[in-house]
Amino acid sequence: YPPLFTNSHTESTSRQRTGPGRIELSRDYIQYAKINPPNKGGQGSGLKCIRVHIHRFLHADLQSTPNIRDLVCTAQSVEELEQAIDLMEKIHNDAGHVIQEEQKSWYVRHRVVGEDGLSAQDRKFRKDSIMTCDEPEDDSAICVAAMFGNDDNGDY
């Protein structure tokens, strides 16, 4: 612990999960967020920050449970997020969920290698790709400076 440093899903663990499960990670995060609220000290954006983290931790589960996903996305309090985690845990328990069989989800979904041997992120930032820019055909195009509005007195 912390899970970031566990040797999970590696060759040395036969590609098995060795760290805590998604539910435990979510509960731990909520507890840390209560102790160190993300909106204190200029950090984060309060509840929105907590919702985003819980959504990412439970990403794989939320794909098949839209009602819980909606609860996480619209939660107006930490207590509502805890209720969503409780509901997900009940589903896990009823289904005989095995933590060691959990697959990586949110944090690696952009690292999936395609047929070209590149991940989505690598493909996005290829150095040999050519970007084009369409130039306006005449001078009637609006200046970038007027993007946010333009009135005669210079105010935006």
Image: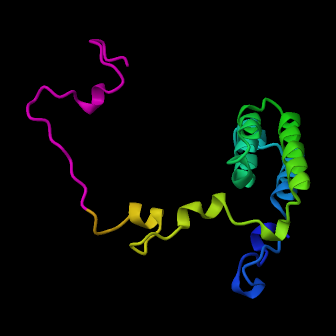
The quadrant of the picture occupied by the N terminus is bottom right
44 displayed left or right of 128: right
Residue 44, image quadrant: top right
Q: Position of residue 57 (x, y in %)?
A: 74, 54
- Which residue shows up at 75% across the image and 68% down it? 4
Foreground pick, 143 / 73: 73
Q: Is residue 6 visible?
A: yes
| Magenta-drawn stretch contains 138 | yes
- Which residue shows up at 88% across the image and 38% down it? 83
Q: Is the residue 14 above or below the residue 140 in the image?
A: below
Q: Is the residue 71 above or below the residue 10 in the image?
A: above
Q: Position of residue 3 (x, y in %)?
A: 80, 68
Give, as a single range, the part of the protein colored magenta: 130-156
Residue 79, image quadrant: top right
| Magenta-drawn stretch contains 63 | no
The residue sitting at the front extreme is 95
- Which residue shows up at 79% across the image and 75% down it? 6
Q: Position of residue 107 (x, y in %)?
A: 64, 61
The quadrant of the picture occupied by the C terminus is top left
Q: Is the residue 44 above or below the residue 145 in the image?
A: below
